[in-house]
Amino acid sequence: MEKNTAELRPGTELLPFLLPVLATSGCAGLIYEVVWFQLLSLAIGSTAISLGFLLAAYMGGLCLGSIWFPRLNLRDRHPLKIYALIEFAIAVCGLLVLVGLPYVNRIYIAVAGYGLPSLLLRGFVAAVCLLPPTVLMGASLPAVSRWVRSTPTGACWWGLLYGANTAGAVLGCLAAGFYLLRVHDTVVATFVAAVFNLAAGAAALLIARRSPAEIIAEQHTADESKTFGDAPAEPAPAWPVFVAIGISGATALGAEVVWTRLLAMLLGSTVYVFSIILAVFLAGLAIGTAAGSWIVRFGDARRALGWCQVLLAAGFAWSAYMIAGSLPYWPVNPMLSTNPWHIFQLDMARCLWAILPPTLLWGASFPLALAAAAGPGRDPGRIVGGVYAANTLGAIAGALATSLVLVPWIGTQHSQQLLLWLAVAGGVLLLGIEVTRRRTYSEWPAIALAVALALGLSFTVRAVPGEMVAYGRLMATRAGQSKIVEMKEGRNSSIVITEWPAGERELAVNGHVQATTAYYDMRLQRMVSHLPALLHPAPRSVLGIGFGAGVSAGSFTRYPSIRRIVVCEIEPVIPPTSDKYFGEENHHVLRDPRTRIVYDDARHYLMTTRETFDIIASDPLDVFAKGTAALYSLEYFEAVKRHLNPGGIFTLYVPLYETDEATIRSELATFFAAFPHGTIWANTVNGQGYDMVFMGTLEPMRIDLDQLVERAGRPEYSQVAASLLGIGVQSPITLLGTYAGRRADFEGWLRGAPITRDRDLKLQYLAGWGINSRLEDRLYRQLIAQRQWPVEIFTGSPERRQELEYAISTHSGF
């Protein structure tokens, strides 16, 4: 029997109070997402494929939950009480994931291999960890929507609830990126999210006590069963709506993949930049959802949904032009301020200007789809769940296809064009079906004109400028000074080769120069290799972390005893490109029969390989780049030790430029915690501090200077001598003159410095905070001021010791 409307209306005054409940839930959901992705990427890797598995598992769970829940026979239960139980269960799952992940990680490392079985295992691990909580998250919106009957205004409220949830996600994104993980760690962040879930559940129970099990939202018309517009007699098919909202999800996530990649390149790939980009994208969705929820009160939802997709052509064209044709040329020098908040405000403004317009249209699409699918007597849970599932399924397909297939295949420019055409196709499909069904054929000329304009707009999408790939946030100060020789867009990174008028060549990755043929940079790249290879009596096997220009790996080819060189590189386009442009400098190491390239995330490879090495030389991206801190954690250094043979040596490149004191102290403290016998070595530019090499050994280091000089002077070491001479090193003693200290020298200075751990990658937040620092020489002077002569490290004849003392006293060593 139909319930009396008068009995149902009293609960409507509580509807606005449900909005902050959904916002709180959304905030918790984004905190979980950030934490889980950070922790799981440490286990299964951070390649595009691994991140694809994480995304598929996370969003797949949302999709499954939205499909599964409405099919449960729970109509006799109060929807808000069920929703509260879901929130409580999410909190429990969130805590269980936090507790269980270390055990899952150990099992994964113990059984992980290579090839297809390894990929399947990565997907299984992601599913085991993420599906239980995300299925519950996906069920939450259909559960709460059952409280509001399916009417035009009811559909409007469904959209508002979704918008509130998305608005909360904006807050969660910013809270996690700028506070919880910067000041605290993943444990604290998880507990905060769980508290938010519990609070949302408790608030829902409180509202449930004061309201009936179903309410009818206040109407703007007297007829509560009236649908949108003048509906024809025949019922409208639902499948075009689901197809359109699925395509909308695909284009939204595909565009997010491309624009996040390009904006991170332009603004600097710190954790803060990624948080800002995601927050702006979500904010646009939330605002658009609110606008769409208002529009459905007065218009034809199906037509509005179709035109939203067609209008996305203009949104794509706007964002593509702003990112590739406008923002890179703004006369903005981010180095003018060392205050990170000034830079964050500028980054926020640029992101809002570039990507907000199209996100408004994607946001409006969701409530329009809800209204288009709604109808009298239909189950709100099934309507909301179906639309949510279609949108999420499309989002999964769009994100995976764009990141794994389209960008490495046709590049970001043509990927955006394809996504633009796909969005228009989705809109035209829905509009065409509506025109045919309603027999309003006079609308075809307008649709045809819109399609023609959209196709024209697609040809305005520009390729990303090579200088942006080369210099990123510093493009305004370096544009026009060098020549772009070649640019490639790979699955994980974009790279560019530049050449300066003096003939120096550079390899830049994702907006930051990684290697050059400049004299000081060649010294550093070869120091990473020559220091351990000279000090090890007879190295036979080497692992290089990061190929870069190949100079570090190539330096090992000069040593007669080395039989195996394994180089782990995450981006497949880098080694062949470097071989083409840096082959002379890297001795064509890629073609050397001793060399084997492993295309994988370096941490994942090191954690899962069974191989051990005499030398591990690490030349990763700068630590401020999101994710790189995983190669500076205590757990990672302990894994390095496990893969060193007895007498093995580990070297790590560490920049002093774009670094502040808090960052370098944390790096040193963590390194010395793992390698108590470690030492540091400095590379200078004209006697000024620039970057360093950390060197760790399993046993206390003993260097016999006379033996070292004698070994380096043998005929079979002639190629080694030539390589050293190329960077101004006349003898091994000159190279040892770069010695800058050991653990005992810095104990007072490092007291209280945070140790970087897998559960607390605070280092990437410290590094991103100090990215505009210009303290390289000051930091270098602080370090060498505390350096003491290490009597027990260097031994040999008085003449050799005196020669070394002089080399060290000159600070530069060259």
Image (cartoon, rainbow, N blue to C red):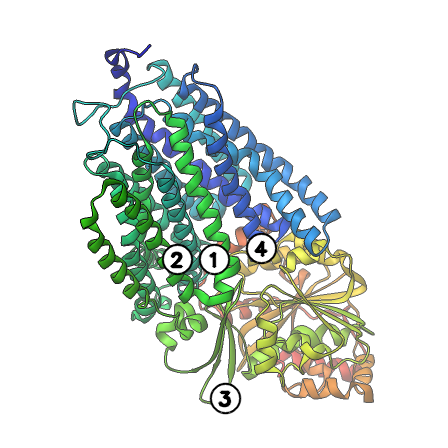
Dot 3: what SS?
loop
Q: CA distance from mark 2 to mark 1?
A: 9 Å
Q: Which residue is tagged 3?
A: 503
Q: Which is nearer the N-term, disc 2 or disc 3?
A: 2
User: Mark 3: which amino acid?
Assistant: Gly
Quarter that holds the N terminus: top left
- Label 3 and label 1: CA atoms lie apart by 37 Å
Q: CA distance from mark 2 to mark 3?
A: 40 Å
> Neighbour class for label 2 at 10 Å: few (<14), some, many (≥20)?
many
Q: Which residue is mark 1?
A: 402
**Given this view, does label 3 or label 1 mark the residue nearer the observer?**
1
Please rate how many residues cluster around mark 4, counting C-alpha atoms within 10 Å: few if below 14, some from 14 to 19, many from 20: many
Residue at disc 1, secondary structure = helix
Residue 584 figure quarter: bottom right
Tell me where residue 601 appears, x and y as whole percent: 62, 59
Which label was assigned to residue 419? Answer: 2
Q: Quadrant of the C terminus?
A: bottom right
Q: CA distance from mark 3 to mark 4?
A: 37 Å
Q: Are marks 3 and 4 in contact (CB under 8 Å)?
A: no
Q: Secondary structure at mark 2?
A: helix
**For marks 3 and 1 on the same chain, the one whose residue lies earlier in the sequence:** 1
- The location of residue 760, given as percent across then percent down, is 56, 47
Q: Which residue is mark 4?
A: 49
Q: Are marks 2 and 1 in contact (CB under 8 Å)?
A: yes
Q: For the residue labelled by badge 4, is the local secondary structure a helix, a strand or a loop?
A: helix
Between discs 2 and 4, the one toward the N terminus: 4
Three-letter amino acid code of the residue under disc 1: Thr
Q: Amino acid at mark 4?
A: Ile
Q: Does residue 480 lie above or below 259 as drawn?
A: below
Sequence order check: which comes first, mark 3 or mark 4? 4
